[in-house]
Amino acid sequence: MRMKWRGALVLLAAAVGCDDSVVGGDVDAGGEVDTGAVDTGVVDTGAVDTGAIDTGRPDVGTPDVGTPDAGTPDVGTPDVGIGDVGVDAGGVDVGGDTGPSCANTTCGGACVDTQTDLSNCGACGRVCCAGSVCREGACAIVDCGNPSLTPCGPACTTAGGCFNLQNDPLHCGACDRACPAVAGAYPSCAAGTCGFACDAVHGNCDGMASTGCETDLATTAAHCGACGHACGAGQGCAEGVCADLPCAGTGEVRCGGVCTNRQTALAHCGTCGNACPAAAGATATCATGACGFTCTAGLADCDAAAGNGCETDLTTSATSCGRCGDACGAGLSCVSGHCERTTCLPPVSTATAACTRVAFSEDWESGTARWNLPRGGTTPITTATDGSACTGHYLRETELYSAGRVFTQSSIPVTGGARYCVTGWIRGSAGTWPFIGMRSSTSTAALGNEHWLIGQPCFGTSLPPPVAPVIADGAWRWYAREFTMPAYTHILLEIEIWNGGAAGTADFDQVQLLEGQCPSVAPATACTAATCAP
């Protein structure tokens, strides 16, 4: 459009001639334009300026009338040439029409200084927080508003702000001096010095800062819920509370920290802490959760009064001999739990003459080869030894029998009508009935008539007087029985624990058959032969 106006002006110049003037000034011979006041006259406001060129986007509006057209731009190079062509065609008019330029940064249509603007510090929209300024495009804290606070780190960031250096664990004593992490604890700061505070489930039970809060108070039995609070025996720690650990045994619960079956436990019978009392002559018991007692051997609770325990001795009681209520009759005494006639003891020899010879003697120091079991038996012939009064080996019988069990293997020659004496050391456990006797025999050791000589008091025998009574109470004693030999030529000695007595043991040592009278006293040396000539 500006080019069309330039052509029109050329045509106009051709029409008026070289010496003619145009409105707004004269043209000299050199063709130079007069730059005087004429240029600011009507020419600029005339039809030329209001043509198509001035109505374009740059010229429309106040700028053509106002200061922009009156300024330097109209005086410069654009005016050189013909008329106002240079003024409208120059770039100066375009810039002038857009308003004043922004020397800094435009944010939201406004010109701002991002080096100092609190709302656009360093960049549009970057707002500095309260108490800070924008300095050189960065937020900076200049006043914390509290003398106890100190600015630390970049302002308006999570790492920056106002902090109390006396108690802030991230800035303890100085900015950015963070207190170190500690196991089981929270870092703490007091008076500008780092420390730590245990969390809810840990404790510093060893008192050492280097290990932190090393103890788990929720599960440690020695420090359950608090340092030093130890759980009892058999207890564990769960969630900081002491509780009994489960017991492995069926029906067991913990009493005093110990797994206990209250159905059988003497100290906790039925309930924890219920101890069964001791009873005289008895052993306390707990069965099905109820206390009781068991009498020791030989004793009984015959009066059924639990308070006095087992008050009756069954081995000696004439009214309860062997068991409660069994009374011994007239002339009988209770011996080792049996009613026996103690008035029928054999006469004691008062003779001073010595026996003539030892017909047989056995001390079992050479084994058991001289004995056998002609009538059978399930237990082999056995010897034993201990440190009791009878030293060395002795025969030990344990099998209850009747009519003799252990016999001499060979028959012993004897003289019918002569005086003989059977002796021996015997020890029987309580209630047993040890016996020594003889059988008539032959040179071939045949079994004949039986005669018991030593055994249960008043035991019947076909060879008077009665047997020498044995006291079975677990003690060694020496026994002797004198008699007149029937018209026999040979005999066999026999030994047994009669099956009418109690089960137990009976020991026999230094069994002898003496020809002549029995010694009036036991040999001076235990378990040796009587002082008779061989």
Image (cartoon, rainbow, N blue to C red):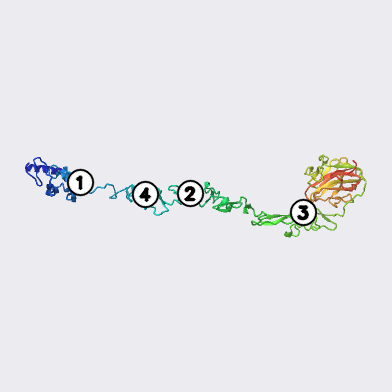
Q: Earlier in the sequence, mark 1 or mark 4?
A: 1
At numbered mark 2, what does the secondary structure look like: helix, strand or loop?
strand
Q: Amino acid at mark 1?
A: Val
Label 3, label 4: how many angstroms apart (C-alpha)?
A: 105 Å
Question: Can you tell which of label 3 and label 1 is closer to the viewer?
Answer: 1
Q: Amino acid at mark 2?
A: Cys
Q: Nearer the viewer, residue 474 or 70?
A: 70
Contact, mark 4 vs mark 2 (Cβ under 8 Å): no
Residue annotated with mark 1:
94
Residue annotated with mark 2:
194
Q: Which mark is residue 298?
A: 3
Question: Can you tell which of label 1 and label 4 is closer to the viewer?
Answer: 4
Q: Which mark is residue 458?
A: none
**Dot 1: few (<14), some (14–19), or many (≥20) neighbours within 10 Å?**
some
Question: Can you tell which of label 2 and label 3 is closer to the viewer?
Answer: 2
**Dot 4: few (<14), some (14–19), or many (≥20) neighbours within 10 Å?**
many
Q: Earlier in the sequence, mark 2 or mark 1?
A: 1
Question: Can you tell which of label 3 and label 4 is closer to the viewer?
Answer: 4
